[in-house]
Image (cartoon, helix red, strand yellow):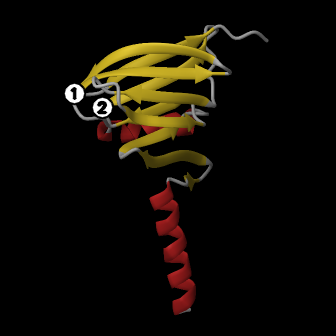
Amino acid sequence: MKSVLTVLLAFVLFAFWTGATVCSADITVQEGENEKVPFATGGVGKAERDQLQQMAHQYNLKMGFAAMSGSYLTGVRVTIRDSRDQIVLNQDFPGPLVYTKLPQGTYQITASHHGLEKTQQVSVGEGLKTVLFHWRVLK
């Protein structure tokens, strides 16, 4: 029994450390850290959006990805560069919503969906800053 608990604890710690998906009653929000920037992503469905909203106080930047029609988009690559043009985050995100915690400053965010890039500049500090990216998507 003790070895089963040890293996289970090791699995949970590995999942947490690597940013594996966190599941709870059909709610799947992925948390992790890339380039030392913590993030949470998800938002497919109301339960995930609600869970992310409850976690929002831990972050200072919220990014959302959608088609011009308003439909959420998934599978967006995000690259964030600081004021010295250094990459602080470079990650593919499965969810249409991404929360990150960045040091206070000005950043350039490039989001890419199916090869189409959108870039915005944002200043973050205290509180939650929201940045939305929209693409014209052909059906």
Disc tally is 2
Q: Secondary structure at mark 2?
A: loop
Residue closest to the far right: 139
| Label 1 to label 2: alpha-carbon separation | 7 Å
| Residue at the spot of label 1 | 125
Position of residue 112 measured from the top left corner of the image (x, y, whole percent): 58, 22
- Label 1 environment density (alpha carbons within 10 Å; few <14, some 14–19, many ≥20): some
Eyeballing the image, is 41 above or below 12?
above
Indicate left or right for 122 with 116 as reference. left
Indicate left or right for 8 with 102 as reference. right
Eyeballing the image, is 139 above or below 49?
above
Position of residue 109 measured from the top left corner of the image (x, y, whole percent): 42, 21
Q: Residue at x 57, y 34 (%)?
A: 95
Is residue 96 in sight in this rendering?
Answer: no
Q: Residue at x 30, y 31 (%)?
A: 60
Q: Quadrant of the N terminus?
A: bottom right
Q: Residue at x 46, y 68 (%)?
A: 13
- Label 2 environment density (alpha carbons within 10 Å; few <14, some 14–19, many ≥20): some
Position of residue 29 measured from the top left corner of the image (x, y, whole percent): 53, 45
| Residue at the spot of label 2 | 60
Could you say which disc has been placed on residue 57 in the image?
none
Q: Secondary structure at mark 1?
A: loop
Q: Residue at x 32, y 37 (%)?
A: 101
Position of residue 63 measured from the top left corner of the image (x, y, whole percent): 45, 25
